[in-house]
Amino acid sequence: MMTVNVSILDSVGKDLSSLSEGNRLADMLLRTITEGLYGQMSLRIFDEDGTKRSDGTLIGAYNPRYFKQRAKPPIKRTNTNVSLMATDQMHASFGWSALSDGSYGIGFDNKLAADKSKWNEDRFGEIFSLSESEKESIQPIISEFMTNHFGK
């Protein structure tokens, strides 16, 4: 499972732990960030129109011979872009969770899917890391959280 490291102190400029509800708020913020990143990553990685790498480019196209098989029922693919959406077990096991050290992680809940993700990255390049736009979405999430909880 990939952990999402966000320094709350640097990003927010306030030590949340010094507040009476600080630890609970810090956990809520990390959870909110992780949920948002998970949603964005899921859309990028498991897009039926084609999986995108972390750099935003499509991972590839099926070769014409293989695509003929993918275009038949029950799959009935209509475009040639490679999509990890077709790997149902991998898609179903992708998620986020709280980790034992108090952080949150985004990744796979079983070894088979994690191994498939490594195999796909060996074939297609970096897929399961945060994209630049996903990283850039963290600050607005923090700002909204701070406004909602502190009116700032």
Image (spheres, helix red, strand yellow):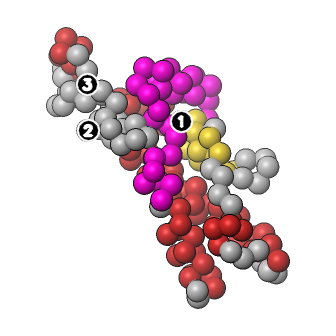
The reply, left or right, for residue 88 in relation to residue 9 is left
Callout 2: helix, strand or loop?
loop
* Stretch in magenta: 109-136
The N terminus appears in which quarter of the rendering? top right
Residue 145 in the image, given as x and y percentages of width and height = 57, 75
- Find the residue positioned furthest to the top: 65
Q: Earlier in the sequence, mark 1 or mark 3?
A: 3
Most common SS among magenta residues: helix
State the residue at coordinates (57%, 28%). 114
Residue 34 in the image, given as x and y percentages of width and height = 58, 55
Amino acid on which disc 3 is placed: Ala
Amino acid on which disc 1 is placed: Ser
Q: Between tags 2 and 3, which lies in front?
A: 3
Callout 3: helix, strand or loop?
loop
Residue 35 in the image, given as x and y percentages of width and height = 54, 57
Amino acid on which disc 2 is placed: Asp
Residue 140 in the image, given as x and y percentages of width and height = 49, 69
Separation of disc 2 and disc 1 at Cα? 20 Å
Q: Mark 3: give few (<14), some (14-19) or many (20+) Cα within 10 Å.
A: some
* Dot label at residue 49: 2
The C terminus appears in which quarter of the rendering? bottom right
Q: Is residue 85 visible?
A: no
Q: Nearer the viewer, residue 107 or 72?
A: 107
Separation of disc 1 and disc 3 at Cα? 24 Å
State the residue at coordinates (62%, 50%). 4
